[in-house]
Amino acid sequence: MNKTLPVAFAAEKYGASEETVVRSLAMSYLITFYIKANIGRTAAICNCFASASAGVAASITFKRGGSDEKIKAAVKNVLAPLAGLLCDGAKPGCALKMGLAVTQAISAAVFALNNVEVRFYDGVADGTLEYALKNLSVLAQQSQPVLETGMANIALEKEARYKKVNCAK
């Protein structure tokens, strides 16, 4: 997901200074890379939502004057509800996931700025952002073999169904 556009649009909407825009873009990319490094390049979870939307949520929260705690809350708010969003390799479908990720990032930032934060017992969320990322990473890595097998079976079944329909013509 291109993090630059949502961050730039938010900067324009909130009238952020050039320095704030540069800092928020840097934060967005650093958080994205940090999460990708924790989850891994190949994981069952859609990296678009997991890493990029977290970077956008942090950036928007920062631009709105959120403290470090509010920024961490925004990242947790974006990760927890979408932890089950799978990477199914559906490239045209990725655009829809990107739109959902941006929408979730904006909501997560607004919630955090209004003192709403997912807590310890909320799914993969945990007491700290670091533990939440660890939980998400475990989920992503342990579910990868199941996803690969399932997606391969779906692709084979779809191919057989396609051949059956087209050969019958």
Image: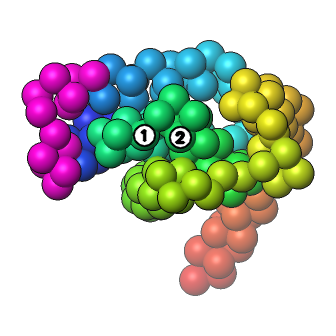
Q: What stretch is highlighted in magenta?
A: 11-23
The amino acid on which the numbered mark 2 sits, given as a three-letter code, is: Lys
User: Splitting the image into 4 quarters, where does residue 131 fall?
Assistant: top right
- On the question of residue 103 being in view, the answer is yes
Front position in the image: 147 or 133? 133
Percent across and percent down for residue 88 are 64, 49
- Secondary element type, mark 1: loop
Q: Percent from the top left, x then y, of residue 65?
A: 35, 40
Q: Which amino acid does label 1 sit on?
A: Gly
**Location of residue 109 in the rendering, given as x and y in whole percent from the top left corner:** 46, 51
Using the image as rendered, state which of residue 94 and residue 163 is in the foreground. 94
Residue at left 47%, top 52%?
Answer: 113
Q: Is residue 123 left or right of residue 43?
A: right
Q: Which of 26 and 47 is in front in this view?
A: 26
What residue occupies the far bottom of the structure in this picture? 169
Q: Can residue 89 be seen in this view?
A: no
Which residue: 58% across, 55% down? 115
Residue at the spot of label 1? 66
Residue 161, quarter of picture? bottom right
Q: Residues within 10 Å of mark 2 (few under 14, many from 20)?
A: many
Q: In this view of the protein, which residue sits in the foreground, 11 or 165?
A: 11
Q: Name the residue rendered at 45%, 58% in the picture.
A: 110
Judge whether residue 15 is colored magenta. yes
- Mark 2 — residue? 70
